[in-house]
Amino acid sequence: MSKRKKVIKCIVGLFLIAILIVAGYFVYLFISYNRIEDNKSLDVVEGADLDTLKAGESYTILTQNLGFGAYTPDYTFFMDGGKESRAASKESVEACIDKAAETAISYSPDFVIFQEVDTHATRSYYVDEVERINGKMDGFDSVFAMNYHSAYLCYPLNEPHGKSDSGIVTYSKAKVESAVRRSLPISTGFSKFFDLDRCYSASRVKVDNGKELVIYNVHLSAYGSSDNLKTRQLEMLFSDMKSEVDKGNYVVCGGDFNCDFTGDSVKKLNGEDAKQFAWTMPMEQELIPEGLKRCMDYSNGKYEQTVRNCDIPYKEGNYVVIVDGFIVSDNIEVEYLENVQTGFSYSDHNPVIMKFVLLDE
């Protein structure tokens, strides 16, 4: 009996220690969690030579979510039903980020906006991806906005996702006069520890007719987000954009909207019975204010995917959607629009490229 009691005491003791460790971890999560301030002025890293844009001239912009440099075609993600929580290696991260920058540069863009770019994260082996891209973007001003900074996430247990500092970065060949980070509404439940903070940035560039081009770089919530939350995020974004339209300024908004951007790409690309996820619900046209328009008139006449679901390795026929794109003000004419197909070779998102003209009204 004495030995049995000792064994029971030992088991109970270990159980209590485990409870204390788990409780201590959750206390750590709650204590370390804090939202980044709203209306935060952003630093502009200077590099552009052009002082002012010209109305009537054509400009090119590219947007892409870089997937923190992890998503080679065989990569699957645990929050999509896959296996991995970190990139395969530091070398793989560097190769993916280099390929993203080189692909963007190959289109001779005047503006580039990237999302999900890590600066210091376990999942991307602490590669400073912004610094790495900056080294390839000669002749551009750059603006980085921290989207979220998370505590160390101990899930999945076999390979924890870890700590993440990640954001969005905007590049401009014309000088950025000022830029600001706006904090979006987020979930108030426990899911906030997985979907984390969210923001968009607004960067201002002078135009020769006295107006400004305001470039919005956005990455909306995906995991654990309700329809209501996504609607509130879009309403805030569109309200801000409408205020610039009312001033007579030019507005270009691009990024990862984490919803069916065209409203019908889920069915068009996957069939009538395709599954709907929280991040593939359609963007509602009625949310878009007067004076703004979604860019969906693709120049090649095709609806082509911009993101894959990462539950399984990529192959043709997998679940794909259009969640990335551009929304512009009515005083902008879109000359060319394409969802570039890369085979998801270095990210789970494809680039979207647009050529546009600032109309001199």
Image (cartoon, rainbow, N blue to C red):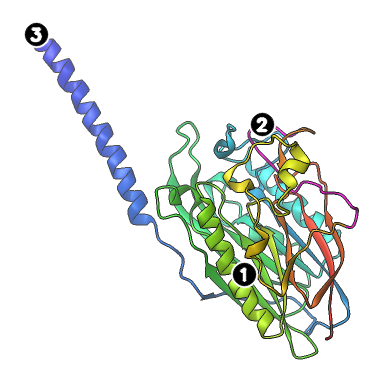
Residue at mark 1 to residue at mark 3: CA–CA distance: 72 Å
**Of discs 2 and 3, which sits in the foreground?**
2
Residue 239 shows in the view: yes
Which quarter of the figure has residue 62?
A: bottom right
Residue 116 in the image: above or below residue 42: above
Specify the segment rendered in magenta. Answer: 299-314
Q: Earlier in the sequence, mark 2 or mark 3?
A: 3
Residue 274 in the image: above or below residue 224: above
Specify the amino acid type for callout 2. Ile
Q: Earlier in the sequence, mark 2 or mark 1?
A: 1
Residue holding disc 2: 312
Q: Where residue 233 sits: x, y (%)? A: 55, 62
Residue at 71 percent across and 37 percent down: it is 319
Residue that lies at the very extreme toward the front in this rendered image: 286
Residue at 36 percent across and 50 percent down: it is 29
Q: Quadrant of the C terminus?
A: bottom right
Specify the amino acid type for callout 1. Phe
Residue that lies at the very extreme toward the top in this rendered image: 1
Q: Which mark is residue 1?
A: 3
Residue 95 shows in the view: no
For the residue labelled by badge 3, is the local secondary structure a helix, a strand or a loop? Answer: loop
- Pick the residue in front: 89 or 282: 282
Residue at mark 2 to residue at mark 3: CA–CA distance: 53 Å
Q: Where residue 185 sits: x, y (%)? A: 49, 62
Q: Which mark is residue 79?
A: none
In the figure, is residue 52 to the left or right of 131? right
Residue holding disc 1: 238
Which quarter of the figure has residue 291?
A: bottom right
